[in-house]
Image (cartoon, helix red, strand yellow):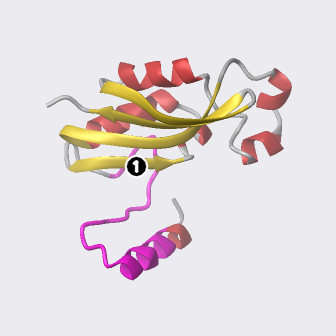
């Protein structure tokens, strides 16, 4: 999202010797990527911070090639968070306040068109959990 993030990512890819990666600055709700042009979408604890999660999943679906997959690690909740938590700036910074209930999060992924939506792993921490979710775009 920032030039500094792009530079850090490029340096990490260079260290690893990976050649099939490209980085572009952009907004997760309006990706600067052509329709059906990529194989995999990976997100690590970012979507819970996006105001319009439905748009994020629609964008991921749009840019994936048929048969592509999305792998997400994100914070979800086991129920509704209290208003006090949702309105707390520190809870936003801690990636908690923007988290959706797990069922709602998965429904949003399915509404975008994804199939085979599965929680691959879950680390529960009270009312919140860190879920790893995999989903596929149909062929």
Q: Which residues are magenta?
A: 6-32
* Residue 49 sits above or below residue 86 on the image: below
Q: Nearer the viewer, residue 58 or 108?
A: 108
Neighbor class of circle 1 (other Cα within 10 Å; few <14, some 14-19, many 20+) is few
Task: Examine the rendered structure and indicate whether residue 66 appears above or below residue 16.
Answer: above
Q: Where residue 17 sits in the image (x, y, percent)? A: 32, 79
Q: Is residue 48 above or below residue 105?
A: below
Report helix, strand or loop for mark 1: strand
Q: Quadrant of residue 100?
A: top right
Asked whether 19 falls inside the magenta stretch, the response is yes
Front position in the image: 121 or 30 = 121
Please name the residue shown 30% across and 23% down the image: 113
Q: Percent from the top left, x then y, of residue 94?
A: 74, 46
Foreground: 3 or 105? 105
Q: Position of residue 121 (x, y in %)?
A: 50, 36
Please give the name of the residue rendered at 66% of the width and 21% of the height, measured from the top-left corner: 78
Which residue in the structure is indicated by mark 1? Answer: 42
Q: Is residue 8 left or right of residue 124?
A: left
């Amino acid at each position: 999202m920032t030039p500094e993030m792009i530079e850090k990512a490029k340096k990490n890819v260079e260290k690893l010797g990976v050649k099939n990666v490209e980085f572009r600055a952009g907004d997760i709700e309006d990706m600067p990527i052509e329709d059906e042009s990529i194989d995999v979408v990976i997100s690590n604890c970012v979507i819970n911070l996006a105001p319009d999660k439905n748009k994020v999943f629609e964008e991921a679906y749009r840019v994936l090639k048929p048969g592509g997959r999305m792998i997400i690690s994100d914070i979800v909740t086991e129920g509704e968070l209290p208003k006090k938590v949702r309105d707390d700036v520190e809870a936003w910074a801690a990636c908690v306040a923007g988290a959706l209930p797990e069922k709602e999060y998965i429904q949003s992924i399915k509404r975008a068109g994804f199939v085979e939506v599965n929680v691959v792993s879950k680390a529960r921490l009270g009312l919140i959990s860190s879920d790893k979710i995999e989903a596929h775009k149909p062929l």
